[in-house]
């Protein structure tokens, strides 16, 4: 394949997959319903996207001097400002139990950029990445945009229904001669599962047996409510590449600051990809992240608030008889609307009915092929009173 053909193919892959979530939301019957709602000037409760209604943990007035000095407008250190790398490494060591030096971390333009750089550095075009489902909607698009092939494996739902052995058997069956890596999120997006030490040790053991890299999406590590968070990097620091994001941990989604932790040998290769794809995040964004790490109070308050918000969605779904997976962590409840969808004439018809009621959800098809009648509902996007109103409208539509 010539360079021109490869470039054209990769462009088409990016074009078709990076917008997966938007395509799922606006597909079939949803687009007209959304348009009618917006044309009428009626609000839509944004339960479809993983953001927070809370004010961010840091604002422009909190920027350190190095983020506003004249030098901040020039090119800066590759891999991130040293002061920020040191502060993140210290927190990674303390909060995740993974001894981390500043040189073992890379500051990226969000966790999406971190995953893209990791895949491009570790996986050749045409090689495979086993992706545990349900998954973060953009993960498979990121893998494809790097030229790699995602191989989807239902995991969490199998884990709950049939147990760990069955879930692991499905993972092993998906591994072939071209498999180079394993991707999973814990706490999980979209279902909130928090993998314990037993699950993580088993997954890492599979990776070690087959010589696979592990891309551990840990962007919700600060939001484990009913289970203790365990970092996969604490089990195999040389093999695991752990991802973090200030979008989720500190409400700084618009700042676009993420972090990647890996062994120095692989970090050098990932750093080269990061340089060629974004050079480095802006100093102002890095300054916001630095300021956000001044105290743990914001995260502690958010964790308490999110725990109560989760109960609003889970309680409403339970009262309506809608099955959903336990959500011991994260920002979402993943619900099975199969019965309601059958009555409504299909999942798209049901989700369009939600839109007409003023609630926008993330269709489960964006999180895996097996979840077409499921939906992801974010419980951090609205203050409690508005969330209660949104769930009342959704339940009425069910």
Image (cartoon, rainbow, N blue to C red):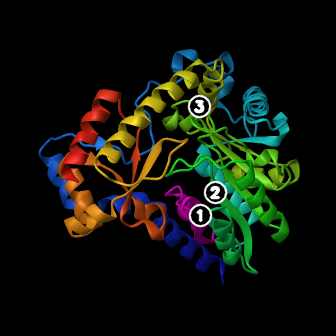
Instruction: Name the image quarter holding the N terminus.
Output: bottom right
Mark 2 or mark 3: which comes first in sequence?
Answer: 2
Magenta-colored stretch includes residue 138: yes
Residue at coordinates 67% horizontally, 70% vertically from top-left?
171
Q: On the image, numbered disc 3 is attached to which residue?
A: 285
Residue at coordinates 66% horizontally, 25% vertically from top-left?
290
Residue 11 at x, y = what percent? Answer: 53, 69
**Decide: marks 2, 1 in contact (CB < 8 A)?**
yes
Of badges 3 and 1, nearer the viewer stands 1
Of badges 2 and 1, nearer the viewer stands 1
Q: On the image, numbered disc 1 is attached to which residue?
A: 155
Dot 2 crowding, Cα within 10 Å, few <14, some 14–19, many 20+: many
Dot 3 crowding, Cα within 10 Å, few <14, some 14–19, many 20+: some
- Which is more toward the observer, 300 or 35? 300
Q: CA distance from mark 2 to mark 3?
A: 27 Å
Residues shaded magenta: 133-162
Residue 385 at x, y = what percent? Answer: 29, 28
Residue 164 at x, y = what percent? Answer: 66, 62
The quarter holding residue 341 reads bottom left
Q: Relative to 312, does residue 117 appear above or below in the rendering?
A: below
Instruction: Name the image quarter holding the C terminus.
Output: bottom left
Magenta-colored stretch includes residue 379: no
The label on residue 221 is none
Disc 2 is placed on an element classified as strand
Dot 1 crowding, Cα within 10 Å, few <14, some 14–19, many 20+: many
Q: On the image, numbered disc 2 is attached to which residue?
A: 184
Mark 3 or mark 1: which comes first in sequence?
Answer: 1
Q: Report the label total.
A: 3
Q: Residue furthest bottom?
A: 1
- Which is more toward the observer, 324 or 185? 324
Q: CA distance from mark 2 to mark 1?
A: 9 Å
């Amino acid at each position: 394949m010539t360079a021109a053909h490869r470039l054209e193919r990769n462009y088409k892959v990016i074009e078709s997959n990076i917008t997966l979530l938007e395509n799922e939301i606006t597909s079939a019957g949803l687009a007209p319903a959304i348009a009618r709602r917006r044309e009428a000037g009626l609000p839509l409760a944004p339960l479809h996207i993983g953001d927070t209604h809370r004010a961010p943990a840091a604002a422009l007035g909190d920027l350190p001097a190095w983020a506003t000095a004249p030098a901040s407008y020039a090119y800066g250190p590759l891999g991130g400002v040293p002061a920020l790398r040191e502060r993140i490494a210290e927190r990674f060591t303390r909060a995740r139990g993974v001894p981390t030096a500043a040189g073992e971390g890379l500051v990226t333009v969000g966790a999406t950029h971190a995953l893209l750089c990791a895949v491009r550095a570790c996986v050749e075009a045409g090689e495979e990445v086993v992706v545990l489902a349900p998954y973060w909607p953009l993960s498979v698009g990121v893998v494809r945009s790097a030229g790699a092939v995602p191989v989807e494996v239902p995991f969490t739902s199998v884990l709950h229904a049939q147990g760990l052995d069955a879930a692991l058997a499905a993972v092993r069956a998906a591994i072939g001669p071209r498999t180079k890596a394993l991707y999973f999120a814990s706490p999980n997006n979209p279902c909130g599962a928090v993998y314990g030490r037993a699950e993580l040790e088993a997954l890492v053991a599979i990776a070690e047996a087959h010589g696979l890299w592990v891309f551990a999406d840990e962007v919700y590590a600060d939001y484990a409510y009913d289970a203790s968070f365990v970092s996969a990097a604490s089990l195999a620091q040389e093999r695991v590449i752990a991802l973090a994001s200030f979008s989720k941990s500190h409400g700084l989604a618009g700042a676009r600051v993420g972090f990647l932790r890996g062994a120095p040998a692989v970090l050098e290769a990932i750093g080269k990809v990061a340089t060629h794809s974004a050079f480095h995040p802006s100093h102002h964004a890095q300054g916001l992240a630095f300021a956000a790490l001044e105290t743990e109070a914001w995260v502690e308050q958010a964790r308490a608030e999110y725990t109560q918000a989760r109960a609003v969605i889970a309680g409403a779904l339970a009262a309506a008889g809608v099955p959903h997976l336990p959500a011991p962590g994260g920002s979402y409840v993943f619900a099975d609307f199969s019965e309601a969808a059958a009555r409504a004439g299909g999942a798209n018809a049901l989700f369009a009915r939600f839109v007409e009621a003023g609630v926008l959800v993330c269709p489960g098809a964006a999180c895996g092929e097996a979840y077409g009648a499921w939906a992801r509902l974010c419980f951090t996007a609205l203050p409690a009173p508005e969330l209660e109103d949104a769930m009342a409208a959704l339940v009425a539509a069910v």
